[in-house]
Image (cartoon, helix red, strand yellow):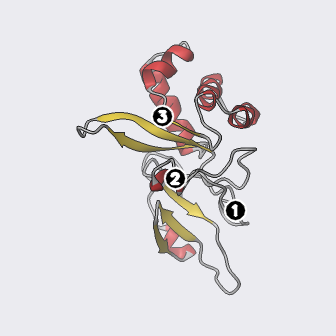
Amino acid sequence: MSHEASTWAWAQDLPTPGEKLLLACLANGADESGVTFVGRTRLAKACCSNKATISRNMRRLEEAGFVARLGRRRANGSRTSDWTILAPLAADRGGMQNADPDTLPDDVVSIARTGKAQPGPDPSGRILSPNNLSLVRSQNVGDQNPQVKNNSQELVATPTELGSVAVEDSGMAA
């Protein structure tokens, strides 16, 4: 359990008590970098809820940028609980540390860290879709193009091109 992750979670302004409780339960199982892989069954029990409600609230948290999820697989290839990252690429992750590349997979490390939020259409640096596509403000001198990052791959797009990106299931226009 990470005190920093729990403190960050309780400080967030969320629209429903279910989302707030879910975020707090995720933080309760997170390490010092805000990473956890607690499953829906355990979350449902902790939140006095059912798995469908947990899935719905998790989607809302992800769409709002409070968490990001990355799939995990067992050695035999079957699915298991997802990696869940709190405050992915956020400018302010509370006291949470950047993820340790020696103990976590590269794709988790790439988003379980402090981002470079700059003024722009979405200055939060939040995850924009369930596919872990995030708009990261990283403007260098003379570079007016935000960078779109999908895990370790970087794609540079102009603001005009970003306006045409469709973000599935998020209800947000990019």
* Residue identifier under label 1: 117
Mark 3 vs mark 2, foreground winner is: 2
Image quarter of residue 14: top right
Q: What residue type is labelled 2?
A: Asp
Which one is earlier in the sequence, the residue at label 1 or at label 2?
2
List x then y, in percent, for residue 92: 74, 51
Any mark on residue 26, and which?
none
Q: Nearer the viewer, residue 164 or 59?
A: 59
**Viewed as shown, does residue 141 lie left or right of 152?**
right
Residue appearing at x 70%, y 47% in the figure: 93
* Image quarter in which the C terminus is found: bottom right
Q: Which of 145 and 115 is in front in this view?
A: 115
Any mark on residue 37, and which?
3
Image quarter of residue 153: bottom left
In the image, residue 77 sits, relative to residue 113, either above or below, namely: above
In the image, residue 58 sits, relative to residue 120, either above or below, namely: above
Q: Which amino acid does label 3 sit on?
A: Phe
List x then y, in percent, for residue 69: 47, 43
Q: What residue type is labelled 1?
A: Ala
Which one is earlier in the sequence, the residue at label 3 or at label 2?
3
Which one is earlier in the sequence, the residue at label 3 or at label 1?
3
Q: How far apart are marks 1 and 2 (CA)?
A: 26 Å
Q: How far apart are marks 3 and 1 (CA)?
A: 26 Å
Q: Do callouts 1 and 2 mark residues in contact (Cβ within 8 Å)?
A: no
**Viewed as shown, does residue 140 lie left or right of 132?**
right
